[in-house]
Amino acid sequence: MGRTVLVSMPSDEQPTVRSLSHPRYDNTALVTLTLTKLHDTVSWPLRLFPPEITLHAGVETTHSYIIFTWSESEDTDIIENLKTQVETLKVAEGGSWNPGGKFLVVVADNDGVSPRELGLQIYVELWKQHFIIDCTILIAVRHKYLPINSTNYTHGLKKDTLDLYTGVPYQSGKCEDVTEVTLLDQWHLRNGTFIHNANLFPLKTTDNFHGCQIRVASFGIPPYLVLTGNSTDSDGKAVYELSGLAVRNLLLAVDKMDATVVYLKPSVGFTVENNLFEAGNLADGRSDIVIATLPLVPLFLSTWFQPTTPYEYTAVKRYVPCPKSVSRMEKIMMTYKLPVWLTMATLFVLTTELWWCLANWQHSALKDSQAFQTLSYCLYNAWAVSRGISATNVLNTWKFRFLFLVYVCYCFAMSTVFQAFFISFLVEPGYGKKFETFDELLDSSVVYGYDDLMEYGMASTSCGEHNKFPSSRRQDCNDIIECMERIANNAQMCTISVPRVSEYLATKTGIKDNSKHLCTLEENLLTTGFIFVLVNGSPFLNRLNVLTRRSQEGGLLGRYWAQLIWITKLRSKMRIVDNINDLYFVFSLSHLSPAFCVLAFGYVISSAVFFC
């Protein structure tokens, strides 16, 4: 069994007419004839749709339509009636509406117009207004008057065949304009067969658009969209020059499609107003495609528009203030934690007392030694050893020498470790603690810079943690580039962005290492892809998708990104270095402050010894 076929027809079955007019033919006979012949060949589920019935759009997209149409009264013609039918069907179908499906339009009367002309009018209406390209039109031509009780639809027909027409847009030299229709085949009523047995739905998607224009609307932020210049042509029209990742991906595809890009006035920025403005232009047919910094999230999907295959996949991250560089002297003083310093001081005191006790114990062989009998001399020698200075008159007993050697080894180890860290911290003191989790960010005083359009987009996903920020800590950040610059300049602000934006901004402003100025939380907020948007049924969509996938597989966008970053670096000339101290620093008196602290402590001890 095939896919479901949606059948639409006008609402009247037996229209009311004036008594002086000729009675109308019962057009349901044509419906019966067509559907019967259809089921003689295949068994497809049919879904009848009179306009009074509201359809509940399901998950499955409709791929086949049969639209029966005729004049419902003398005051309406076939084209007006068809417009009403299609608009009603389009609204009722909702998300299941598929202008890229196969359409068979069956016309019961030609309203006195030649079949070819009527077929052209119908095709142009469906193509221009609804982007229906795969459409075949069956037109029956009969005499104006037929008895209402005629049981056979073929009675009274002017010809013994039914004509089937279609149009083909984007032919060489005609672009989107369709000026004629082609007679595909004819149905022989007497034999019940096609005369030529031709394909009624020939392939109309083209790989070559013969230089036809594709009007490009755009909005977004660098590096995805960059306005490089504008000028005026000989006709007085504004000509815009754009670059960036989104533009480059489009140009790679359009070059193979042999289409001519015409940029409409770009909206540089990522705001709700820009989004609505460009969506309106696309819906009204003033543009053919919207290229933007649009993530593939539910908010930006619509029944009236279709997204392309994402031209880039990226992680969305929370950008937070980077930790500040720690002062060299502060880092040196913090080489050892407080418990280590206390342990060293305790061991220093205990060693001093142990030496003094050994020298003054009544049964000790050291009792007659003058060097260690006083507490001040023991303290002096212990301090000298800890500083790497030789002690005086060390006793020659094995017990004392063993304890003395253990203390010397301990002091040597601690001093070596301290000196190693001392030199390391002079070269690279490091940074303070960074934000690692969202809870840490929430518990801090950092404000959240929000973008209205991104907020709406995030609301359509499962990511809602950003709503936990109180209103007092929320700040308008519609200019995302400005907010990222503030974060790079150590402002206490966080926001949501993508790595490409931060890397481009850092390169443009001359920052050597953006990881020290634009920091992120370790966890990604979400992973998404950036898309283009076309109107539902656009003939450019399929070819764009194919070429976009090939571009991804070939890494062409990555190559362009490397070139863009390199050119931006050359233009910025790296005006800003992360820190002048990264290259060298002046070894000043302040760097010797730990030594002076030790010297002062020694003076205090010396004074105590002197007075004691």
Image: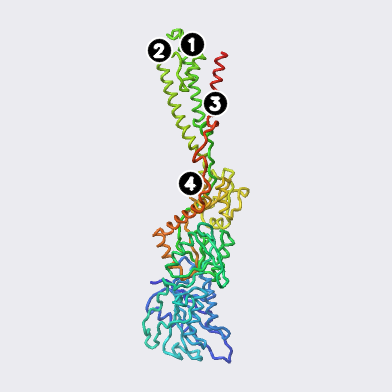
Q: How far is mark 2 from mark 3, CA to CA? A: 34 Å
Which residue matches tag 2? 396
Q: Are marks 1 and 3 in contact (CB under 8 Å)?
A: no
Label 4 element class = loop
User: Residue 5's spot in the image, x, y percent?
Assistant: 44, 74
Rendered image: mark on residue 522: 4
Q: Are marks 2 and 3 in contact (CB under 8 Å)?
A: no
Q: Quadrant of the N terminus?
A: bottom left
Residue depicted at 49% across the width and 25% down the height:
343
Q: How far is mark 4 from mark 3, CA to CA? A: 40 Å
Camera-side residue of 326 and 511? 511
Among the 4 quarters of the image, the one containing residue 443? top right
42 vs 464: above or below: below
238 vs 82: above or below: above
Amino acid, disc 1? Gln
Mark 2 neighbour class, 10 Å CA radius: few under 14, some 14 to 19, many 20 or more: few
Camera-side residue of 477 and 104? 477
Which residue matches tag 3? 597
Which residue matches tag 1? 373
Amino acid, disc 3? Cys
Q: Quadrant of the C terminus?
A: top right
On the question of residue 56 being in view, the answer is no
Label 1 element class = loop
Label 3 element class = helix
Amino acid, disc 2? Asn
Chain-order first, disc 2 or disc 4: 2
